[in-house]
Amino acid sequence: MATTDHAILDARAIRKSFGSLEVLRGVDLNVAEQELVFIIGPSGSGKSTLLRCFNRLEQPTSGTIVVDGIDILAPGVDINAMRRRIGMVFQSFNLYPHLNALGNVTLALRKVLGKPRDEADEIAMAALARVGLAEKAKSYPNELSGGQQQRVAIARALALEPKVMLFDEPTSALDPELVGSVLKVMRDMRESGMTMVVVSHEMQFARTAADRVVFLDKGEIVEAGAPERIFGSPAQTRTREFVTRIEHR
Amino acid sequence: MTDLDRFLSTFFNLEVMARYLPMIVDGFVLTTYLALVIIATGLTAGLLLAVIRSQQIRLVNWTIVFLVDMFRALPPLVIIIMIYFALPNVGLGVSGFVAVWISLSLVLTAFAEEIFWAGIVSVSKGQWEAARSTGLRFEQALLYVVLPQAVRLTIPPLTNRAIAITKGTALGSVVAVPEILTQAQTGLSFSYNPSTLTLGALAYLILFVPFVVFGRWIETRFAWKR
Ligand SMILES: Nc1ncnc2c1ncn2[C@@H]1O[C@H](COP(=O)(O)OP(=O)(O)OP(=O)(O)O)[C@@H](O)[C@H]1O
Ligand SMILES: [Mg+2]
């Protein structure tokens, strides 16, 4: 399991304030190669903010974040070069409505990696096939179900061959019957060795797929450990209360 | 002579119309040309300003907002007169054509900037974030993700605004630009018959109806369901 010397993502003492509101209060998180870290926590605890710090959509107030050996907060770092190695999947999919599925996936391949159209199409088709949507390549987002849109969004990130993928509540906006298709894709990715950080309320998925569950509350990591332990015998009262609450929903 | 005959010979006098047709055609060609350069200038400059504004540099934005509000507030005729009659006093004399071109372009720029800006702002933050998270630079996200969506939203108001402002080319009659209205009035003063004005009105219809239809077409052509 996780060893720090193969850390893909190493975040230390991350603090983030919005004005006078301190949302992250010194978070340390280390994600090893091929590890799946699952983050849980109450609404407003800072889960999204933490993920967004990992690709600098949010600028931490202090702390260090090293991704694949590169300090992404260092002045002068090529953040765009780093971002394509850090895939991100959003709760609201954020597919580009004016482009079809293929166009959504090829945009960064062509404009960031500079691939010619043929090659970009080929890579994109392979990524769409991985999420089971090769036959939807020509469909526009509005012609796809929520589950399909989210899988296209995953393909869009996957096509860039990221070192780590960040998921912010990828199934929260989906109808219950569509959640399974997205989780299946995530499980496949995990099996093929993708390093993943997942914020989600899908506890069943956490139990079966996560290496480590991290409980975040009020901008601090309260407890982290194997899913059996966090869900079965949490050491902290706050964790126990949260887990009980969420299991009985 | 019946009332109808009198009406027809006053406003639809074919003989007068035939005589002044070449003049009106000249006016039509000039008006078309003037309208096109105004639209090209105004839309380009408006888009450019909106893009500059999206960089969120405070002092620059204040300047843009100030200028935009000024040119939206001033009546176009006032701007034309200022440029045509006031600029020569500081050694910058321009022709009536150029005065109208600059004035209406400034007005269209101001409105277009506001419309493009509203379009850019209306694209959700998530679109920017998705684009930036794949490594696109700010300008790339703007160009390939945000503007294509913003521009679609702006087509109906831009078309309306462009039509409203280019119709202001008729103000060129004040500064001796031989556009449609000027020609029609000249024709009237020679013939004492307002049929030349009828002809002018027809010329405006021929010029602007396709424009309106084009706007409608482009609106449906680029529409997509959310
Ligand atoms: N851009 C921002 N400006 C000001 N406050 C913000 C901003 N983004 C987040 N916050 C605040 O930071 C806190 C943490 O937000 P965050 O979205 O990280 O929580 P979360 O754990 O993801 O919650 P949820 O489960 O509801 O998604 C909240 O109080 C939120 O209001
Ligand atoms: Mg969140």
Image: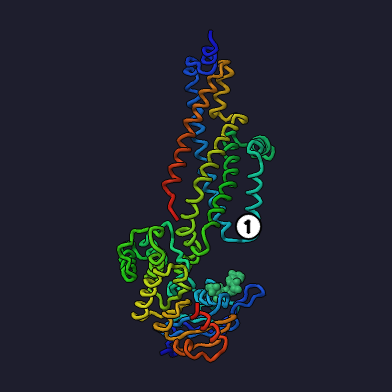
Across and down, in percent, residue B147 comes to 49, 55
Q: Residues within 10 Å of mark 1 (few under 14, many from 20)?
A: some
Residue in the foreground of this view, choosing between A111 and A39: A39
Single out the residue that lies furthest toward the front: A248
Let me know if residue A4 appears in the view: no
Q: Split into 4 quadrants, where in the image is the C terminus of chain B?
A: bottom left
User: Which residue corresponds to the image point at 60% horizontal and 40% vertical from the top-left?
Assistant: B103
Chain to which mark 1 belongs: B
A150 left or right of B84 in image: left
The residue at 56%/77% (across/down) is A46
Q: Identify which residue, B122 or B175, lies in the foreground.
A: B122
x%, y% of residue B90?
A: 68, 40
Q: Nearer the viewer, residue A70 or B176?
A: A70
Whether the residue under disc 1 has CB within 8 Å of ligand 1: no
Is any atom of residue B213 visible in this view? yes
How is the rendered protein coloured? rainbow
Q: Which residue is mark 1?
A: B60
Quarter-of-image position of residue A187: bottom left
User: Is residue A51 left or right of B84 when viewed as pictured?
Assistant: left
Seen in the picture, residue A3 relative to B82 is either above or below; the reply is: below
* Quarter of the figure with residue A44: bottom right
Amino acid type at circle 1 is Val
